[in-house]
Image (tube, rainbow, N blue to C red):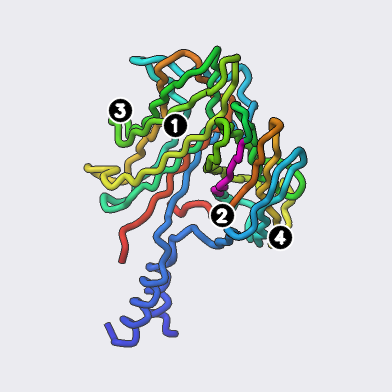
Amino acid sequence: MTEKENGISTIIRDRGILTEFKFSESFVSPRFLTTTPVVLSTITLRIDDTANQVWLNAIVNWAISAGAVTGTADLLFEILRGNAVIYSIAQSGVFLPGSSTLFNAQLQHVDDNPLGGVNITPAFVQYQLRVTPLVVPELITVSTLSQVFTAAELKPAIC
Amino acid sequence: MPENIQGQLNFFQRAKGLLTDFQVSEPASTFGSINPPIEIAVAPGFTTLTSVNVTINSQTNRVWLNGTLGLTAAFDAVGVVTVTLQLLRGTTIIYQTTKTISSPTVVPATVSEIVHLEHIDLTAVSGEVPVTTTYTLRAQADAAIVTSSGPITLSAAQLERNP
């Protein structure tokens, strides 16, 4: 490449900040929930720079099948980095006698410290999407039906 | 410009990413971490939940806004409460959605709900650039029984126009 060509490529340098994108998706296997947490999806990212952020998004479709009872079930949807919970959001599911009801839980979190203070790059970081039953009354069945979990690595903007 | 140089230029232009800026405000990232919880105002009032600033670099740029928050309603008996959520650019409402939260039981109950908002701002700026724009997420309820104890997340991704 000539010097002039180098100059052109410098001018049009890439300003895009999305450097990595991974996802985990499933709509096949229901996971029945009782009392223990269930990991729904796992994503591993290769973080290239300590200044990078990770934009995490997830949608979980879940259901309640109720017997002859009325009430609410409470689930806690969580995102973990390694073994640490870095995000959680709660959703109640209202049910009526004999009903089958569907719900959608949406999660969004930006992890601005994906390496947890460790300044060695590149490094692999694992994120988990987990659901923890908080309240599951008797005479109902709670299950997740599908989920999508995405992780986008973003570098700081070039101003 | 020689043809081969133009070809390389086109290649690099095609390969250029459109996502050029990403800002987020996340005052709380876990359920229960806002203590005491934020009380959602009853109409005509509004409760500001969070704001995010974006520096717009071009009049043709778009801002992709995503808001996600957890709400809790405390019912004394069977009932329904309606929550209105808005996104503002400065003081201008650019997006609004509503969510109902209900309880089916005659006994007191606490019901948690998730709200997600998504909007593309096509007219983020009309004057000179660069300019910093503030986007705000706020909420209103029709009964004084709704609170947020987290999480609250508002993200803004700046996208250049398609090639």
Chain where mark 1 sits: B
Q: Please name the amino acid that badge 3 sits on.
A: Thr
Pointer 1: what residue?
A: B51
CA gap, disc 3 to disc 4? 42 Å
| Residues marked 2 and 1 touching at CB (< 8 Å) | no
Residue drawn where x is 26% and y is 50% of the image = B59
CA gap, disc 3 to disc 2? 35 Å
Q: Is residue A3 above or below residue A56?
A: below
Q: Is residue A28 left or right of residue A125?
A: left
Q: Please name the amino acid that badge 1 sits on.
A: Ser
Residue drawn where x is 54% and y is 35% of the image = B26
Callout 4 and callout 2 share a chain = yes
Q: Is residue A108 above or below residue B136?
A: below
Q: Is residue B70 left or right of residue B14?
A: right
Callout 3 and callout 4 share a chain = no
Q: Secondary structure at mark 3?
A: loop
CA gap, disc 4 to disc 2? 21 Å
Q: Which residues are magenta?
A: A58-66
Q: Please name the amino acid that badge 2 sits on.
A: Val
Magenta stretch, overall SS: strand
Pointer 3: what residue?
A: B91
CA gap, disc 2 to disc 1? 27 Å
Q: Nearer the viewer, residue A102 or A43?
A: A102
Residue A151, by quadrant, is: bottom right
Residue A63 horizontal/vertical position (percent): 58, 43
Q: Earlier in the sequence, mark 4 or mark 2?
A: 4
Pointer 4: what residue?
A: A124
Chain where mark 4 sits: A
Chain where mark 2 sits: A
Pointer 2: what residue?
A: A148
Q: Nearer the viewer, residue B44 or A16?
A: B44
Marks 3, 2: nearer the viewer: 2
